[in-house]
Image: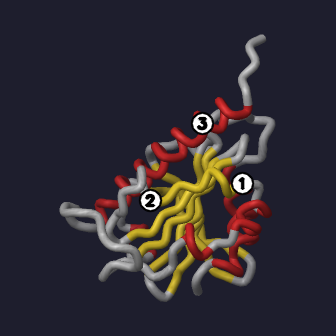
Amino acid sequence: MRRTSVGVVRGRLQVRAVLGAVCSVVLLAGCGGAVSGESAPAGPAPGDPVFSPCDDIPDDAIREVGMDPATKSRDILDVHQPGWNICGWNSDQYSLSVFSTVYTFDDLRNNSEYEDFEAIQAGDRDALAFRSTAYPASQRSYLALRSAEGMVMVVVTDWDEDPAKQAPARVVLEATRTLLPHLPQ
């Protein structure tokens, strides 16, 4: 039996989380146009949401959902995606990403890269649970909430798909409920 250190496992999870975030934005990118140019200055750029998960969700809330605040990663490989603010964290079991976007539920529902939409309640908020066609439900689950600027998506990924762990759909709902006080209306 080969033993793997926690640091190696976390490193692998971080790489996988970044790849997952890349795939998520690429899949929803069908909602928008081409991206080019140089990186933007600090603060929201025109057309970007004001809510910034990395800045607006406190470390204590990230710990409460079982993630390690020290693993925080902004955007996709630190490259800002116009129309999006993205942040991700890892634990030794899952990765969590929070996306704030100007895109709407209608944009999401009209994107063929997503399916199995289900209207649910997350605390006192109406939410939309769904999945990506690129990942099995046993590996990744999404939950979206409307916001004044568009929507906020919470994504949980179980990279090793261990059947002994809670399913990503359950984890993403619990994480979203915990994060609700920090997510925009």
As drawn, the residue found furthest toward the top would be 1
Instruction: Name the side, left or right, on which 29 lies relative to 118.
Output: left
Q: Which mark is residue 75?
A: 2
Mark 3–mark 2 distance (CA, rounded to whole Å):
18 Å
Q: In front: mark 1 or mark 3? A: 3
Residue at 39 percent of width and 54 percent of height? 113
Is residue 3 positioned above or below 165 on the image? above
Q: Which corner quadrant holds the N terminus?
A: top right
Q: Give the percent coordinates (x, y) of residue 117.
A: 53, 63
Q: Give the percent coordinates (x, y) of residue 152.
A: 53, 73
* Residue highlighted by disc 1: 67
- Asked if residue 142 can be seen in this view, the reply is no
Q: Find out whether the residues at labels 1 and 3 contact each other: C-beta distance under 8 Å.
A: no
Residue at 66 percent of width and 78 percent of height? 182
**Amino acid under label 1?**
Met
Q: Which corner quadrant holds the C terminus?
A: bottom right
Scheme of colours in the image = secondary structure
Q: Which mark is residue 11?
A: 3
Nearest to N terminus: mark 3 or mark 2: 3
**Amino acid under label 2?**
Asp
Foreground residue, 42 or 86?
Answer: 42
